[in-house]
Image: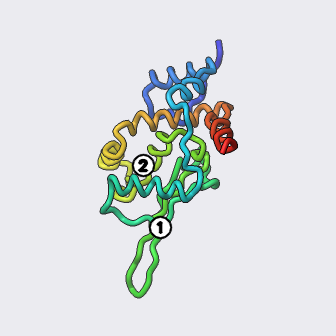
Amino acid sequence: MSSPVLLPYLQSYPASLQQQAGSLVQSGKLGQWLLQRHPQPHQMRSDKALHAYVMGLKGEHMRNSAALAKVVYDSKLQLVYQALGIHVRTGNNHGGKTQSRHEIRIGSLFKHAPEAFLRMIAVHELAHLRESDHNKAFYQLCEYMEPSYHQLELEVRLYLTWLDQGGHRLWQVAADAADGAR
């Protein structure tokens, strides 16, 4: 009998879902399942394209929220210890007034991922402009901006599980081939 698969990215999910994920990992079919769900990577490879994408989501759903100073891919984010992306708020005191600057940094791993994964992470970080905590209002805002938010979060966590178990970056080859064809 094989030993159970460790699933650190899925610990908050029900045991039945963890068992299903563990079965997909042990059978070697998790990567195939993810590729069936999301066959193509997105095309937002540069920080400029990412910025435009996130600003489009912000304009569509959160016009009156705080301005964003920067939106970039960040190769220094350690997904295991930090997050998929981070929202940074810095305060500058100038002339007796405090000014806030907001930045969104998304793990560079997601340069080569499906657009749905990128959207879920961007929505999550945008929601932090209004709600700093992961509370009910925060998740309601995420679902408002992306109705499939919770399903996509699960699939992103499954992808991280795939990578954690020694799988290769699923959409990297397709993205590199598309970039080479141009």
Label 1 sits on a secondary structure element that is loop
Q: Amino acid at mark 1?
A: Ala
Q: Amino acid at mark 2?
A: His
Q: Is residue 125 above or below residue 70?
A: above
State the separation of the CA atoms marked 1 and 2.
17 Å
Give the mark, 1 or 2, whose residue is nearer the N terminus.
Answer: 1
Q: Residue at x 53, y 47 (%)?
A: 84
Percent x, y of residue 125: 44, 53
Q: Is residue 130 left or right of residue 17?
A: left
Label 2 sits on a secondary structure element that is helix
Percent x, y of residue 7: 56, 31
- Residue furthest to the bottom: 95
Q: Determine crowd level at label 2: few under 14, some 14-19, many 20+ residues with C-alpha closer than 10 A.
A: many
Closer mark to the observer between disc 1 and disc 2: 1
**Disc number for residue 132:** none
Residue 34, picture quadrant: top right
Percent x, y of residue 69: 47, 67
- Residue furthest to the front: 182
**Disc number for residue 69:** 1
Quarter of the image containing the N terminus? top right
The residue pinned by badge 2 equals: 124
Quarter of the image containing the C terminus? top right
